[in-house]
Image: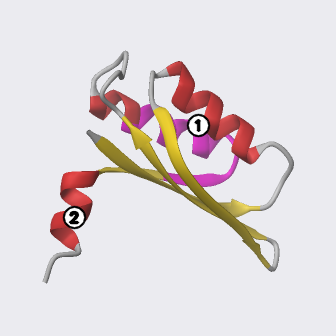
Amino acid sequence: MKAVVSVIGRDSVGIIAKVSAGCAECGANILDISQTVLNQYFTMIMIVDIRNLTIPFDGFVDRMAALGRNDGLDIHVMHEDIFNSMHRI
């Protein structure tokens, strides 16, 4: 099982490290990552493997959102099934 993690906020040093550490603490493995800075805004999308989460999925969603709030970032986690359903015609 996979999830899509999106991160948006003002650019600063260490964002990728913080988000990666948050994923690792919960047992999520990063499979793919794309990031860029647009003007002064950092944007990142990650695909993570959630089969080995050490906490329930909703706990992972909440923990990542809280991590973002602490650093002025919007971090959103969506299960791949929901993501795929939303983008199916």
- The residue drawn where x is 55% and y is 25% is 24
Residue 88 occupies quadrant: bottom left
Q: Which residues are magenta?
A: 61-75
Point out residue 26 in the picture as x, y percentages from the top left corner: 46, 22
Classify residue 61 as left or right of residue 81: right
Q: Vertically, is 67 above or below 68? A: above
Residue nearer the viewer, 10 or 1: 1
Seen as rendered, the residue at the extreme top is 54
- The residue drawn where x is 22% and y is 64% is 84
Point out residue 3 in the picture as x, y percentages from the top left corner: 35, 46
The mark found on residue 67 in the picture is 1
Classify residue 39 as left or right of residue 65: right
Q: Which amino acid, mark 2?
A: Asn
Point out residue 17 in the picture as x, y percentages from the top left corner: 73, 37
Name the dominant secondary structure of the magenta segment.
Answer: helix
- The residue drawn where x is 68% and y is 51% is 72
Point out residue 64 in the picture as x, y percentages from the top left corner: 50, 38
> Does 52 appear in magenta?
no
Q: Which amino acid, mark 1?
A: Leu
Q: Earlier in the sequence, mark 1 or mark 2?
A: 1
